[in-house]
Image: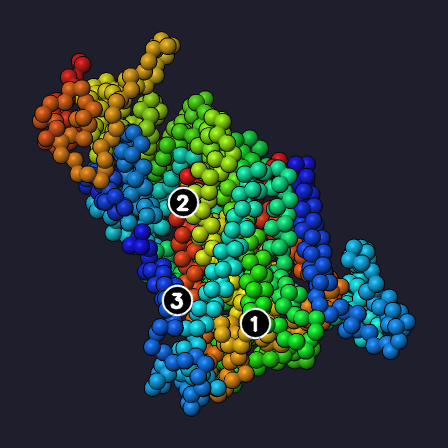
Amino acid sequence: MFKKLNLFSKVSFVWIGLMFFFAIAGKLLPIADPTEYFDVTGAGLFTAGHILGTDSNGYDLLANVVVGARNSLSIAVISVGLGSLIGGILGIAAGYVRGKTDYVLSVVFNIFLSIPNLILSLVLIAVLASSSDPTVPVPDSRRLVVIIASLTIVIFPILGRITRGSTLAWTNSEFVIAAKSMGMKDSQIIKRHIIPNVLPSIYAVAFLGVGIVIVVEGALSLLGIGVGDGISWGSMLARAQGDLEFAPASLLVPLTFLALTVIACNQVGDALRQRLDSRESKL
Amino acid sequence: MSNFLKVKNLDVKFSTARGLLHAVKDVSFELNSGESLGIVGESGSGKTVLSRATMGLLTMSTAKKSGSVKLEDVELTELTREELRSKWGTEMAIIFQDPMTALNPVRRIGAQISEGPRVRMGLSKAEAKKHAIELLTLVQIPEPEKAMKKFPSQLSGGMRQRVMIAIALACSPKILFADEPTTALDVTVQAQILSLLTSLRKKLNMAMVLVTHDLGVVAGHTDKIAVMYAGEIVEFAKTEDLFRNVRMPYTEALINSIPRITTKSGTRLPVIDGRLPDPTIPLVGCGFAPRCKYATDKCRTEHPDLVDAGNGHMYRCFFPLKVMN
Amino acid sequence: MHKLNQIFQALTKLLLVLVGATFLLSLIVRLLPGSPADFYTNAFNEEDRLLQIKALGLDRNAFSSYAHWIFDLVRGDFGPFFMSGGSTRPTSLIIAQSIPRSLLIMLYVQIVSLTIAIPLGLLTAYRADKAVDRIISTGLFAGSAIPGFALALSLGYFFGVRLQLLPTIGYVPIAEGLGEHFKHLILPVASLSIPLCASYARILRAEIISTLRQDYVTMAVSKGISNSRVLIKHVLRPSSTSLITTASLNMGALIGGTVIIDQIFALGGLGQQITFAIFARQYIALQSYIALIAIAFILFTVLADLLIGVVDPRTRNRNV
């Protein structure tokens, strides 16, 4: 499987693997404490002791990027996972039952899709993560939950629509029609024939979804309503925006990690989807 | 007399995912001006590749071509792309099997016919339009002025094929390659198109290469016939000679599978069992041997050469059929 | 008839989506802690406060408020924009200020993206799988996946902070000098155009490759006309339907979906107004902005359908 991929996809796979390694094993790596202030502030790349430099506060950027990987990826994976689950179930329902169910669900998907995803999550977060008393700050843990919830709402209609399309195609395939005509129960058909065939396209789009979520999370941070201070790639960007002249690395390092991860997710999702397209075109 | 079109040792290979595909093997033939040649074979026999390779029209970048193609003593294989292009349309033209896919769906008939004359012959817009209407009249399209404004999807299959012929003839080519020109059409329309092609060929003194899988199609419309099998010419003769004195068992089988008026309804037409050999595997014996009822061990182990029986009748068989008379 | 019926059905569905999206947003914003009533009233006694709330229309429930807004919208009124002290000004004033720049930016982005994408798509498709194509296509892929704000921030850093070549903030109307106008828009337009242009080129490349396999292209080649004529006259048009559809879908998105670029470069377009409206609990204005984007989206979809009909007659005959 891996051998068949082109070079770009292989590099993408390796990169995503590396980010997950950072996310999981980050704490065990021999790197600086991300919350420790160092004397060197605004150091450039390849400074002794700080291979990716430091920001204007003297935080080690490598250490922060590794911690950021954990937070950015956890947010992305959890919200895409939840979104796939919800979108998958609704999509299969729409594609398999069809008729009115399909009409209503399609309209619901389209309502959510018609609102630009950043605006949607912005509104949701503004609602869910602000306290009625402005003097009491919203606790970080609640912000995190809210952000994951709103990103899930951004992702589920995308997954829902893709799943619906794929389900429709497989529902019309000969073996499903045959199974129906032999009196197989709908729940059995969905379990045996629909889900195994639809799942691969959900995986493919889920990779694209991880890319989308990382971007939206970054954008939310830039607008000032991301997760707490400096602990995800997006919030590192937000913190660095004011220090461009003094510590450019503090912007460019997280930006590079974020952009490369998004590109890699897209590439992997695309490669998976291309393989599926040729499979589904044979239907 | 020097031949108008001389193809010598033409050989085409494609590199594919399954290996090197030998589509055309060492093919040679000659054609006089105004003459017509039928190239007959099953699909996959290499006849389409042969006609496109002769024109230099192979678009696939994986094609490897060798051999010589001379048109009026000009060696086409040595021409630059630009020089070759100057021959297309004005000296050599081609029509395709399915006029639905061979006409541009988004351009009007008029624009497609007058493009050649405008670009290649430098006609003005008005002249090109007049010329296009003449061409549509020539291919017997009713109300040519109206047809000019139509899109291909608004015409019937037979009309589309006539339009394609008009496009091919637009710059008065000296030779026309017709690649299965009637396969996609209804039987009655097939006959009309064929007789149109033949009458145009005679009227314009144009040579023609008619590529088809149907030996019955070429019978009344060609001077010579080349039968192709697995990328090779297996029999080559004047048309009447071929039908009267068939030598190659494969050709015999092809002739037997043509429906005749005398065939009683309800009788089964003989079909040729088996398939063409895999073109990615080099042939050991005669390519037709596995399907041939006369085949011997020699046929299966040695590859027969193309031999001339005199009077230009050539065949590739160790045990040719007896001549009738 | 069949075609008309189809268009009608599609439009009903779109309108349903439009109503659903705006109502959903207004409901969510209403749930925001801190009612607009607290933001925009400044009366000292309860009686005056209630009067101000009534003047703002904040005494209505969600349905009645939405009905009022829809009724206004149909008459071309974008509803009230709350001002402190219970007064309002028409939202249309803000729209009139922000829409021209949003439209201009969208126009520039589309022009730049398409002019670069079309030749790139032709080149990569014509040279498919050759070295040139592989290099450019890899670049196009990366370009299409890179987030716009990553470009905005890094371009802003290099050209604004480092080289001090271009301004990184603010919008200058054409009336105040064409040179300054363009200078201020180079970075935002570039940040939006690079991903867009790359995805356009990829869409076009894929479709041209499948067109190049068609017999009518070989037919055109056999006329002896030049390759560039074949590509432009015979290949480009039948290959452009996906590109037209995608480009038109992006029109609506570009008008209001550029929230983050608007914010980074402080352009004051519709995107920035939307962010502002959310934080300032201007839910009527927010509804109007979103409706505007959705209407633009619908308009451009219909326009694209018509354009595709002109470009590709096959689609015209499909339902006749």
Q: Position of residue C252 (x, y in %)?
A: 63, 59
C318 vs B312, left or right, is right
Residue flagged by tag 2: what amino acid is it? Ser
Q: Closer to the camera, A196 or B240?
A: A196
Badge 1 crowding class, 10 Å Cα cut-off, few under 14, some 14 to 19, many 20 or more, is some
* Labels 2 and 1 positioned on one and the same chain: yes
Mark 2 vs mark 3, foreground winner is: 3
Query: In whole angstroms, how far apart are the C-alphas of marks 2 and 3?
Result: 35 Å
Chain for numbered disc 3: A
Q: Please indicate, yes or no, whether residue B309 appears anywhere in the rendered image.
A: yes
Q: Residue at x 49, y 27 (%)?
A: A183
Ranked by sequence position, the earlier of labels 2 and 1 is: 1
Badge 3 crowding class, 10 Å Cα cut-off, few under 14, some 14 to 19, many 20 or more, is some
Chain for numbered disc 1: A
Q: Residue at x 25, y 28 (%)?
A: B275
A96 vs A44, left or right, is right
Question: Which of the 4 image quarters holds residue C170?
Answer: bottom right
Q: Residue at x 56, y 72 (%)?
A: A140
Q: Position of residue C266 (x, y in %)?
A: 62, 76
Judging from the image, what secondary structure is the residue with disc 3 in?
helix
Which residue in the structure is indicated by mark 3?
Answer: A24
Q: Which mark is residue A230?
A: none
Q: Please indicate, yes or no, whether residue C139 appears anywhere in the rendered image.
A: no
Query: In whole angstroms, how far apart are the C-alphas of marks 1 and 3?
Result: 21 Å
Which residue in the structure is indicated by mark 1?
Answer: A140
**Residue found at the very far right of the displayed protein:** C47
Which residue in the structure is indicated by mark 2?
Answer: A278
Residue flagged by tag 1: what amino acid is it? Asp
Question: Which of the 4 image quarters holds residue B80?
Answer: bottom left
Query: In whole angstroms, how far apart are the C-alphas of marks 2 and 1?
Result: 45 Å
Ranked by sequence position, the earlier of labels 1 and 3 is: 3
Q: Residue at x 35, y 43 (%)?
A: B91
